[in-house]
């Protein structure tokens, strides 16, 4: 007899197979028991008919508790009533591990309770679906950048200085030195681009932000491509192709997961149409002012502003050329205007906020040195970074996409905490 996983059921119709599973739920009457089985690959139904099995097996089925682990033997059959399409007609059950008083029952639980039980909450069908989408976004990311000729480069996680904002750094002791957990691998990726041309990173980043919004994690994963000989306009084209590719692959490979999440697939399909709209920061300010926002030029946008702008379109939108004063030291000023920089944020539709931040980098030695001084950053910490402008500097651009922001958006989940297996939040580092 063959051991199979639930996801392989279609290939074994009519065969007797053995499956290791957990009992997610159970319904039974005097004559029949329905077991909702899950094995990590998928969920399907096990049917135990009293008149077809030994009495002890039927009794065992009736007494199974939620989340007990079992070896199930039975025959795979088509099941036209379920979306999955197959079920197993059980002939034997062997309990592997009992489960008493499983804390997460089919009734509603509060978020804090679920977060305290995150290690168990991950087993539920919604969390399973989100993790499938996460896996697909990761898979498609590697596929996209490999196809486009990028090399994967891993920047360090322990760093000696700030890459973004020095107030959001996690400090740690590195023998006799001060060190910080990486907020962004960008500066190292710029060095890598000068060595390898087109590169991307994919790793954890840390922000000691005291933000408690539905979009902020303390630890999140970021994809950071960096491209030599590329200007900001060319970088925008890569960005929109990449995001459309992610949406298309989630549509192609996560059909069941999208159903579990009740996600509108027609809406997602619209996000694969290119190009994405572009609006300048200046135009965005005007638009907001015309619509009763008291925004003044020079301010950053908060989420109500971002959402309002995003709602004007049915695709993700780029907001271009923000004021220099509110952006980091490394962004290149606009050639015709000193007060704005060559940058863009990509804002997701439906109120999911910024998913990408990117820019063309300052490639002139003197200009960059002056910016570092203006930002009170110690030149000696950035000498290696300045070297890139000393030995064959070239125009180059890059961006960072927040993995969990994209998963939250594509899965249509309310809060970012469900898009990572074990979220680190302002008030939570357990479990
Ligand atoms: O806009 P950010 O801060 O850009 C950078 O770090 C650049 N160095 C990237 C680059 O050009 N290589 O962050 C990039 C993206 C944001 O658009 C957002 O999607 C995500 O990272 N992000 C967060 N995601 C979850 N929680 C947080 N606290 C996040 N902060 C940023
Ligand atoms: Mg940003």
Image (cartoon, rainbow, N blue to C red):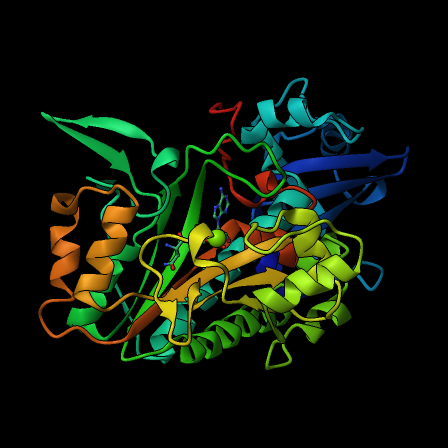
Q: Is residue 4 visible?
A: no
The location of residue 408, given as percent across then percent down, is 61, 51
| Residue 341, picture quadrant | bottom left
Q: Residue at x 61, y 46 (%)?
A: 128
In the depicted structure, whether residue 230 falls above or below residue 126: below
Using residue 372 as the reference point, say whether residue 123 is left or right of it. Answer: right
The location of residue 142, given as percent across then percent down, is 39, 67
Depth order, front residue of 30/217: 217
Depth order, front residue of 254/319: 319
Depth order, front residue of 12/421: 421
The location of residue 238, given as percent across then percent down, is 44, 76
Q: Residue at x 30, y 52 (%)?
A: 185
In the depicted structure, whether residue 405 falls above or below residue 113: below
Using residue 304 as the reference point, say whether residue 164 is left or right of it. Answer: left
Q: Residue at x 17, y 49 (%)?
A: 382
Q: Is residue 107 visible?
A: yes
Q: Residue at x 15, y 64 (%)?
A: 388
Using residue 404 as the reference point, say whether residue 124 is left or right of it. Answer: right
């Amino acid at each position: 007899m063959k051991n199979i996983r639930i996801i392989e059921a279609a290939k074994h119709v009519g065969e007797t197979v053995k499956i290791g599973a957990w009992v997610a739920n159970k319904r039974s009457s005097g004559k029949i028991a329905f077991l909702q089985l899950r094995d990590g690959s998928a969920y399907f139904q096990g049917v135990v008919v009293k008149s077809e099995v030994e009495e002890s097996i039927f009794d065992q089925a009736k007494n199974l508790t939620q989340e007990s682990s079992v070896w199930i033997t039975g025959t795979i059959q088509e099941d036209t009533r379920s979306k999955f399409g197959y079920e197993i007609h059980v002939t034997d059950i062997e309990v592997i591990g009992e489960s008493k008083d499983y804390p997460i029952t089919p009734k509603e639980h509060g978020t804090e309770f679920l977060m305290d039980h995150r290690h168990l909450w991950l087993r539920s069908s919604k969390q399973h679906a989100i993790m499938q989408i996460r896996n697909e976004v990761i898979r498609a990311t590697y596929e996209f950048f490999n196809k486009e000729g990028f090399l994967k480069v891993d920047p360090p996680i322990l760093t000696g200085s700030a890459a973004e904002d020095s107030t959001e750094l996690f400090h740690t002791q590195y023998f006799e030195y001060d060190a910080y957990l990486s907020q962004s691998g960008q500066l190292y990726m710029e060095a890598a681009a000068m060595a390898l041309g087109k590169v991307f990173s994919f790793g954890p980043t840390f922000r000691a932000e005291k933000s408690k919004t539905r979009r902020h994690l303390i630890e999140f994963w970021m994809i950071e491509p960096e491209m030599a000989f590329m200007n900001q306009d060319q970088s925008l084209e890569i960005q929109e192709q990449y995001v459309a590719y992610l949406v298309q692959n989630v549509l192609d490979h996560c059909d069941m997961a999208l159903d579990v999440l009740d996600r509108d697939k027609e809406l997602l399909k619209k996000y694969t149409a290119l190009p994405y709209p572009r609006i300048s920061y200046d135009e965005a300010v005007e638009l907001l002012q015309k619509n009763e926002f008291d925004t003044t030029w020079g301010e950053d946008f908060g989420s109500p502003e971002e959402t309002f702008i995003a709602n004007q379109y049915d695709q993700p939108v780029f907001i271009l050329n923000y004021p220099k004063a509110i952006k980091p030291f490394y962004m290149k000023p606009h050639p015709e205007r000193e007060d704005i920089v060559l940058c863009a944020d990509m804002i997701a539709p439906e109120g999911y906020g910024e998913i990408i931040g990117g820019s063309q980098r300052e490639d002139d030695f003197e200009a960059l040195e002056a910016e570092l001084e203006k930002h009170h950053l110690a030149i000696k910490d950035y000498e290696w970074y300045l070297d890139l402008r000393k030995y064959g500097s070239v125009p180059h651009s890059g961006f960072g996409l927040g993995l969990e922001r994209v998963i939250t958006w594509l899965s249509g989940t309310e809060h970012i905490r469900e898009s990572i297996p074990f979220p680190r939040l302002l008030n939570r580092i357990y479990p």
